[in-house]
Image (cartoon, coloured by chain):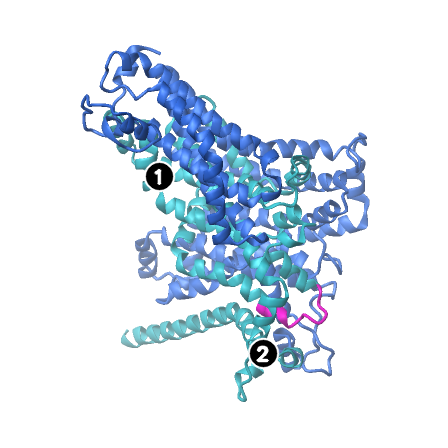
Chain colours: A blue, B cyan
Amino acid sequence: MTEQTMEAMPPDTGDQPDREERSVGTAYLAMIGFPVGAHRWYLGHTTAGILYVVTFVLLALARFAFRERVEADFAPIWTVAVALVVAQLILDAIAIPRWVRRDPEAPLPAPLLILLAVLATIFVLPLLLDALGAVFTAVFGRDRVGRQVAMMVIAILGVPLVLWGYVVMVEHMLRHLTEVWQRRVRPWLWLAPGLFFLYTFLVYPTYGTIRRSLYDRAGDTFVGLENYEWFFNSPNTLIALRNNVLWLVFFTGISVVVGLIVATLFDRVRYENFAKTVVFVPMAISFVAASVVWRFMYVWNPPNANQTGTLNAIIVALGGEPVDFISTRSINNFALIMVACWVWVGFCMVILSAGIKSIDRELLEAARVDGATEWQVFRRIQLPLLAPTIAVVTTTMLIFALKTFDIVYAMTNGNYDTNVIALEMWSQFSFNQYGRASAVAVVLLAAIVPVMAYNIRQFRRQEEVR
Amino acid sequence: MTTEVVGAKRGFRIGRWALHLVIAIILIMWLVPTIGTLINSFRTETAVRFDGWWNALAPPYDFTLESYRHVLTRQGMGDAFINSLIITIPGTIIPIAVASFAAYAFAWMKFPFRNVLFVIVVGLLVVPLQMTFVPLQILFRDAGIAGSFLAVWLAHTGFGLPFALFLLRNYMGSLPSAVFESAAIDGASEMTAFFRLALPMSVPALASLAIFQFLWVWNDLLVALIFLGPNIPNHPMTITLAGLVNSLGGEWHFLTAAAFVQMALPVTVFLLLQRYFASGLLAGAVKG
């Protein structure tokens, strides 16, 4: 830390602070965070003050939300609160020499006042907590739902504020480093929360799953490739594997082709936006709800009865025999794939439609003037120019086809030979067969790795253009 | 010559009509499943069981709100609706908050391994969630939060982060660098640049990200099943609904109403904010 960098630190607002009388009252207010007096610009105190207040509120909410097990579980939060105060103390202690020099820009140190504030905080906090707790009880009620809503409020207020407080703190600490070191250290501190989540929730578990797939059910005996042997030899998982191939080919093929047709057709009419919305809306519907909707399309009744399912009613009206779409083994996989297509064609359409729009209209007009038919315009001009977009859509669909779960779970739960890999993973997981479940997951990852490699290559190429 | 032009025009006109006809058929194919189910949700149990929904369109009309009343009060859908909200709101806000700081660092700070790290993020975009379930479940169990909302929030934060980072970093990176350079010359700290410039300028990307994450968490079944599985009081609507589909017994005709209760919120959000959703899709997919 050099004196120069300290001096060069500019105030956050433009106005020059004057030397002014520091009454104990103003000083205290400034210190606990109210923007008063010459210290208006000193973000540290304001932020710390807001953080104190927010910590109070969150603590009160937390106490309310977890009423039964307050004291023991709140050690971490107390630690954080104390750490905030201590950090503030340290920051202020650093500024003492400047305050002694009567530097007008020196932050307010007032160690005694801070000590007083800490003491006041410690004594006032429980009272404040109880007062706020009473307010929350009045607002949310004391039942389970009320407590959980309180928990939600803690999470949605607390996390952004903690992150904000974290960055403010980081920047404060960094001010004591030289420019060069600031630039070296800052990115990592800003990345830290994100990298923490990526590591804890994606990277580390991926490693853990690969490891676990080589162990037995309880996870303590190394069994080599036994779980994989089971996967590639049991009839149920082989059916799942076969069905995923069906999904890969037919789901990807149908949704990309239909998406392309729909996008090209809609591009030629004036009510394009309305039409696109109609096809796009299923994207907002959960697969479970889509399954319910299609259950009613696929309803089957015996041939003599009144057909209440839309599709069978049409088939019978056309003179056919009613089809049991769900349990007929040659058809049911395609029935499920159709549901997924109904949802995902909208996605393909939107992406491909944007691709079509980015093609120069004059190019198409020129071709038409030269006597090209609409089919030729599509086949010879639009299609080749769309190839990269089609590739992107196709890879997305391939990944989805491999991961497909919800529709099969909701419509057949894997019965009648409709099992898929992701559902098999869930079954093994729910039987506590963690070794087998891990092996199934690794098979899924292995199937996705080529797509991942392709994506990364595309991304690199894109970055070179940037 | 003239007749040829007229003929071409007539052919063109027939082509136009054929085009409109094909589009109309496509739209009907897309609307019929939803409309049929919607109509069924307003009918009585006997009508749903023995009669196709299309017959309800002819008089005598006999519509009722009985299914909705039943579903909201007696099938646990009311509680599940609140659970879905409790899961979804933090599950949307937390990942975006975490991602925005890191995305800014990726976009505007220089540090070693920046590109390697971001390539890893791009790779993590497609890692199947199944790869994480077993170790995370064990982790949550050891931490004593298995089956709680906290576990699901954390899981959704981790799972949503690669896409959020990818989208936000690309968007922030495409902001004009002159803005940040002049801010730095005027003495703005990185914090000021982030809060006063990068974040407000990224509002469109943040909006599409929020819609995405909201729809994904609200409609999620798998993550909820894995991490809330045995804890029935915490089940969101997707699990309750899936449970109803599989228990075909006497509850069959309530399914329709239950499905529409589950759909109502995401479809409304989607229809209102479709533009942001589509632009998010394009930013996320075309560039990948």
The quadrant in which the N terminus of chain A is found is top left
Residue B257 in the image: above or below residue A453: below
Bin the neighbour count of mark 2 within 10 Å (Cα to Cα): few under 14, some 14-19, many 20 and up: many
Bin the neighbour count of mark 1 within 10 Å (Cα to Cα): few under 14, some 14-19, many 20 and up: some
The quadrant in which the C terminus of chain A is found is top left
Position of A466 with respect to A25 (left or right) is right
Residue A323 in the image: above or below residue B84: below
Nearer to the camera, A261 or B194: B194
Instruction: Indicate which disc, 2 or 1, sits on the residue closer to the N terminus.
Output: 2
Three-letter residue code for mark 1 = Leu
Residue at (70% x, 48% y) in the render: A426
Give residue B43's mark. 2
Residue B219 visible in the snapshot = no
Nearer to the camera, B149 or B11: B149
Q: Are marks 2 and 1 on the same chain?
A: yes
Three-letter residue code for mark 2 = Arg
Q: Which residues are magenta?
A: B247-257
> In x, y percent, where is residue B206?
40, 45
Magenta region, mostly helix, strand or loop? Answer: loop
Position of B124 with respect to B178 (left or right) is right
Kindly state the secondary structure of the residue where label 2 is placed: loop
Residue at (65% x, 45% y) in the render: B147
Query: Which residue does the numbered mark 1 point to in the structure image?
Result: B199
> In x, y percent, where is residue A280?
47, 60
Residue at (39% x, 33% y) in the render: B104
Residue at (54% x, 41% y) in the render: A63
